[in-house]
Image: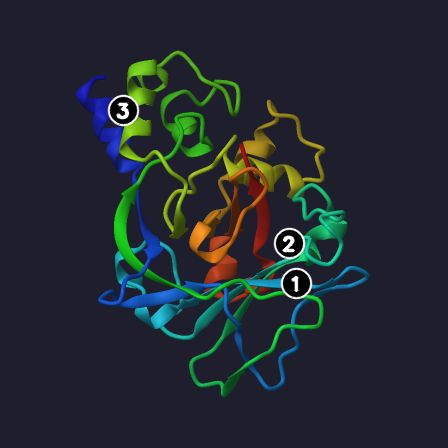
Amino acid sequence: MSPEDSEKWLGLLRPGMRLEVATDTDDAVGRLGGLPALPASAEWPVWDGRGPLSFIASIDCARLSAAALDIDLPAAGTLLFFYFDGQLDDGEALVLAEDRESWAGARVLYVAADEKVAEHEAPAGLKPYPAVPLTGRVEVTATEPWHPSVRAAFAPDAPLGNRYDHPVCSQEFLDALWEFDDEVGHQIGGHAHSVQNPVEIEIAEAVLDGEASWDDPRLSEEAGNWLLLAQFDSEDAADMMWGDAGALYWLIRPEDLAERRFERAMFTWQCS
């Protein structure tokens, strides 16, 4: 790879907060599972016609190294993530980005730091996941060479979501990239670690109602409008298994994040 291409690749790297199960000596920035602390006026999120969502994770924004990230997270307050995980219907109803009717099956709530909150018991029929504290550290994150942002930098005319004729798509480079970051993990901000094709493309397809083909420039443009808010991997310590060892992803547009419109976050999940 030329020095120019190397410099261009490095410029596409982004900082992300990697989250791991905390030990007794670690400072926790959030947790998986347990019960959410909700304001008295807040109702537990429900998918109408299906039932209440399961509580997945809580992130304390004040404990994040938000200044080191490149997304506009709140300086304080709590982000709560909920997902309809199939407990109530044995997995019959799936939350899918391409199915607008299912979008209510995943939710992000933001609780401001000055709101009075209390731990909320889970609705009948839902078994809370074990509470697992998470610690965090800022790391450099990379993404696939066929991610829209990388493709735009090196081969803007190449087919979306596919390998193309450039050193960043060589097997040697892909092997090195995999060695650099070989697991999905839990994360706030940065580049998503997609299990399959870039999650940004999935979200863009959903937002465009599946009406834009992969060679339609609208799809690539829309994919570039979305940032990873959070991803949560399958986690043995919390008894969480998403499909076949998959992961949950929440993405948001920068303008909605800046305006704290977390209800506009989009969700998808992938598994191998």
Q: CA distance from mark 3 to mark 1?
A: 39 Å
SS for dot 1: loop
Whether residue 130 is situated above or below residue 183 in the rendered picture:
below
Q: Nearer the viewer, mark 2 or mark 3?
A: 2
* Residue named by callout 1: 53
Q: Horizontal placement of 9 versus 208: left or right?
A: left
Specify few, some or many for label 1: CA neighbours under 10 Å numbering under 14, 14-19, or 20 or more.
many
Question: Is there any visible trace of residue 229 in the rendered image?
Answer: no
Q: Nearer the viewer, mark 3 or mark 1?
A: 1
Q: Nearer the viewer, residue 63 or 251?
A: 63
Question: What amino acid is labelled 2 in the image?
Answer: Asp
Question: What amino acid is labelled 3 in the image?
Answer: Ala
Residue drawn at the location 41% of the way across and 20% of the way down: 155
Q: Along the polypeptide, which appears first: circle 1 or circle 2? A: 1
* Residue named by callout 2: 85
Q: Are marks 1 and 2 in contact (CB under 8 Å)?
A: yes
Whether residue 140 is situated above or below residue 171 in the rendered picture:
below
SS for dot 3: helix
- Image-quadrant location for residue 132: bottom left
Whether residue 150 is situated above or below residue 82 in the rendered picture:
above
Q: CA distance from mark 2 to mark 3?
A: 35 Å
Residue drawn at the location 42% of the way across and 80% of the way down: 113
Question: What amino acid is labelled 1 in the image?
Answer: Leu
Looking at the picture, how far across and down is residue 151, in whole percent? 42, 26
- Image-quadrant location for residue 53: bottom right
- Image-quadrant location for residue 3: top left
Q: Nearer the viewer, residue 60 or 56?
A: 56
Q: Along the polypeptide, which appears first: circle 3 or circle 1? A: 1
Looking at the picture, how far across and down is residue 55, in whole percent? 57, 64
Q: Quadrant of the N terminus?
A: top left
Q: Which mark is residue 27?
A: none
* Residue named by callout 3: 176
